[in-house]
Amino acid sequence: MNKIIAKKQLSADVYEMTVEAPLVSRARKAGQFFIAQLDTEWGERIPLTIADADAEAGTITMVFQAVGASTMRLARLEPGAYIANILGPLGNPTHVARVGTVVCVGGGIGVAPLFPIAQSFKAAGNVVKVIIGARTRELVIFEERMRAVADDLIIVTDDGSYGRKALVTEPLAELCAAAPRPALALAIGPPVMMKFCAAAAQEAAVPVVVSLNTIMIDGTGMCGCCRVTVGGETKFVCVDGPEFDGSKVDFANMMSRMRTYKAREDADRHKCRIGL
């Protein structure tokens, strides 16, 4: 049993929770995830990225969007309540090295799992430039955390309500075209955002890494639902990733598969919201 220590609502459907998980907090590395299970027997396995951790306190922090039955149930829990099972850390950690200048791009709630990665690259002695993107000001998250580790922080919103009115690809292309060019770009967010971030970095011959955690379901490689095509080969995000060379990911295939059950998912989500 894992006790919920703190909870914060970041926007309409997005929540931040800090949970006791001492073994996970000590072992985790940037880029890894864990599985939460609300019930011991029939609870759905929810793969969530580790947004932050405190090894001394024995806690991990997760950020999630309440979009289905299980995440809506999780969102209703309050500090003092318990999550039945937490399994982790899982997935391959980010390869962190001292390479020079690194550009980290986060879209929406993808900013949360990007934070420990930016933090680790900064600790390794790199110049870290961060781009945060959101549809509107109310959806910008982790701004203060990112300011603490970024040498340069750029915020863009689709509607121009905060920061610069632009998509994240615009400042990314500018940074990639600057001299000297960044040694690496990393992007986490909606698949379509990562697709165009990868294209922008490729155009400037900047290596790009993307995290495909949004497609994971089981988290241990057994269900096969998170299979993606990378460099012409079939990979499973949960065990082979979640990070891959963005220039080799078949985003069209990935996004097509993620839309397969969209109508059913939307209907079920509506039932969850009205309590059916």
Image (cartoon, rainbow, N blue to C red):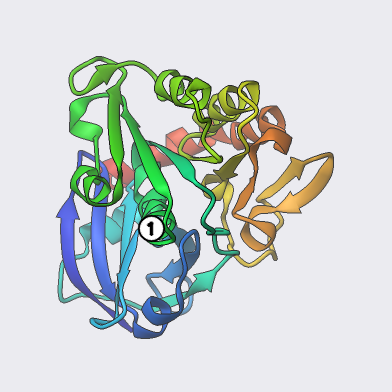
Provide residue 110's location: percent of width, then percent of height. Answer: 40, 43
Provide residue 21's location: percent of width, then percent of height. Answer: 34, 80
Residue 67 visible in the picture: no
Under circle 1, the secondary element is: helix
In-front residue for pair 233/105: 105
Tell me the crowding category of disc 1: few under 14, some 14 to 19, or many 20 or more residues within 10 angstroms, Cα based. Answer: many
Quadrant holding the N terminus? bottom left
Q: Which residue is drawn at 84% across and 39% down?
A: 232
**Residue at the front extreme?**
180
**In this view, 132 is above or below 57:** above
**Residue at the right extreme?**
232
Q: Residue at x 58, y 63 (%)?
A: 219
Left or right: 182 with respect to 270?
right
Residue 275 visible in the picture: yes
Location of residue 259 by image quarter: top right
Look at label 1 and name its amino acid.
Pro
Provide residue 223's location: percent of width, then percent of height. Answer: 68, 60
**In this view, 15 is above or below 103:** below
Q: Residue at x 24, y 35 (%)?
A: 140
Left or right: 262 with respect to 74?
right
Provide residue 119's location: percent of width, then percent of height. Answer: 36, 56
**In this view, 198 is above or below 218:** above
Query: Which residue is labeled 1 in the image?
Result: 116
Left or right: 160 with respect to 158?
left
Q: How many labels does the image show?
A: 1
Q: Which residue is drawn at 50% across and 63% down?
A: 32
Location of residue 248 by image quarter: top right
Location of residue 111 by image quarter: top left
In-front residue for pair 124/104: 124
